[in-house]
Image (tube, rainbow, N blue to C red):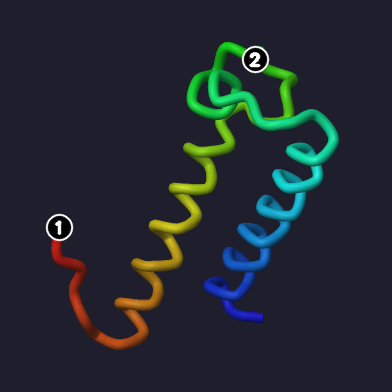
């Protein structure tokens, strides 16, 4: 499995856990958009981690195709 595929798999697992959490506990925007829920909370830094993984996937895809990312 390539690095890109591993990252995508990790992102899919994160999505699955998020949906499970949402169904179990509901969605609280404060918990999702801030770190106010505490360091042991399931959503702690979820958005940041997911964004980092997504950026790595995009960078790897550009590298594979020999293109550059426009920022």
Which quadrant of the structure image shows residue 29?
A: top right
- Where residue 9 appears, as percent x and y from the top left, is 67, 67
- Where residue 56 appears, as percent x and y from the top left, is 42, 60
Q: Which mark is residue 47?
A: none
Q: Residue placed farthest to the left in the image? A: 70
Horizontal side, residue 69 vs residue 27: left or right:
left
- Which element type, helix, strand or loop, lies under badge 1? loop
Label count reads 2
Q: Which mark is residue 37?
A: 2
- Where residue 23 appears, as percent x and y from the top left, is 80, 41
Mark 1 — residue?
A: 71
Which of the two labelled residues, at mark 1 and mark 2, occupies the earlier sequence position? 2
Q: Is residue 71 above or below residue 42?
A: below
Horizontal side, residue 54 vs residue 63: left or right:
right
Q: Give the spatial CA distance, label 1 vs label 2.
A: 32 Å
Answer few, some or many: residues within 10 Å of disc 2's Cα (few below 14, many 20 plus, some between 14 and 19). some
Q: Are marks 1 and 2 in contact (CB under 8 Å)?
A: no
Q: Residue at x 74, y 31 (%)?
A: 26
Q: Residue at x 62, y 26 (%)?
A: 44
Q: Residue at x 49, y 26 (%)?
A: 33
- Which element type, helix, strand or loop, lies under badge 2? loop
Quadrant of the frame with the N terminus: bottom right
Q: Is residue 64 above or below residue 56?
A: below
Q: Residue at x 30, y 77 (%)?
A: 62
Quadrant of the frame with the C terminus: bottom left
- Where residue 69 appears, as percent x and y from the top left, is 20, 68
Q: Is residue 62 above or below residue 12?
A: below
């Amino acid at each position: 499995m390539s690095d890109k595929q591993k990252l995508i798999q990790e992102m899919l697992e994160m999505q699955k856990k998020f949906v499970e959490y949402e169904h179990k506990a509901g969605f609280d925007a404060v918990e999702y958009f801030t770190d106010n829920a505490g360091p042991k909370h399931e959503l702690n830094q979820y958005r940041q981690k997911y964004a980092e993984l997504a950026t790595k996937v995009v960078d790897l895809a550009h590298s594979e195709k020999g293109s550059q990312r426009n920022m």
